[in-house]
Image (cartoon, helix red, strand yellow):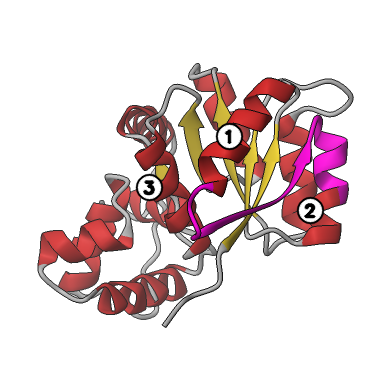
Amino acid sequence: MKTNPIRVLIVDDQALFREGLNTILSVHEEFQVIGEAANGEEALRLAVQLQPQVILMDLRMPIMDGVRSTQLISSQAPNCKVIVLTTFDDDESIFDGLRAGAVGYLLKDVASEKLFEAIRATARGEYFLLPSVTAKVMAEFSRISQAKPKIDEQLIEPLSSREIEILKCIAQGDSNKQIAEKLFIAEGTVKNHVTNILSKLGVKDRAQAVIRSKNLGIL
C-alpha cells in the first residue's frame, strides 16, 4: 500500500542551497517539499500555515535566526519537527538548536542517504543525531550530571531490565530501528518500550529521558 509522502519545509537564506535540496528531495516519491523560507520569520509563518511534518532549518539567517524560529515553531506548531541543517558544529550551536526544540542536527556536508534517513526518523517521532553530535551531547550530559548532586528519589514504577537496555541505546543516539536490530526485537516493540520509559521517567522526549536517568543514577 502506497503511503503519503513526508511533507518537508526547507529553510535557508541561500537560494541556491534551497533549490538544490528541493531537487534532491523531489526526485523521491516519499518526500514532498511543500514550501521554502529564506529566514526564520518566514519559516514560522509557513509552519503554522502549511503544517509540514519535517522542517530542515538553517541556524544563521537574517531577520530571525533558526534558533528563535525553532523555539516559536515548537510552541505554535508543535506537530512540526525541526531538523537543524547547518555548517556549524560547535558546541554552542548544537546545544542552542537542541534546547530550542530541534529533534535532529545535521551538517550540510551530510550524505543524501543520511539526510533521507533523518527525515524518515523524524517523521516517525524519533530523534536523529550524527555520532559526532551525539558524542558532544553525551559529554555535556556527563558534565551536568557530575556537577549536580544525585537526586535522592525513586521512580514510582521502576524500569525493567529491558527498558534500561533500551534506555542505554537511546543514550547512544540509536533510533528505534537501530535498537530493534541490536536487540533482535520488533521496531513496534521498541516504540512501546520507549513510550513506557518516557511515562515512568515523567519526561516528554528521549533527550530528557537520558538527562533524568543520569540524575537518578540509572545510567
Q: What element carries label 1?
A: helix
Task: Say whether residue 218 is visible.
Answer: no
* Pair 1/2: label in front: 1
Q: Does 124 appear above or below 8?
A: below
Residue type, numbered disc 1:
Leu
Look at 67% across and 31% down and name the residue there: 18
Q: Tags 2 and 3 in contact by the CB under 8 Å rule?
A: no
Q: Quadrant of the N terminus?
A: bottom left
Res 162 quadrant in image: bottom left
Q: Name the residue under label 1.
A: 21
Q: What range of the chain is rendered magenta?
A: 27-45
Magenta run includes residue 19: no
Q: Nearer the viewer, mark 2 or mark 3?
A: 2
Task: Report x, y in % for residue 186.
Answer: 21, 76
The amino acid type, in three-letter code, at marker 3 is Lys
**Side of 206 relative to 46 (left or right):** left
Badge nearest the viewer, 3 or 1: 1
Tell which of 66 and 113 is nearer to you: 113
**Crowding near the residue tagged with mark 2, few <14, some 14–19, many ≥20 C-alpha atoms within 10 Å:** many
Residue at image point 50% right, 36% down: 105
* Distance between mark 1 and mark 2 Cα atoms: 18 Å
State the separation of the CA atoms marked 2 and 3: 40 Å
Determine which residue is flagged by label 2. 47
* Disc on the earlier residue, 1 or 2: 1
Q: Which mark is residue 150?
A: 3
Residue, x 87% and y 37% (percent of image)? 41
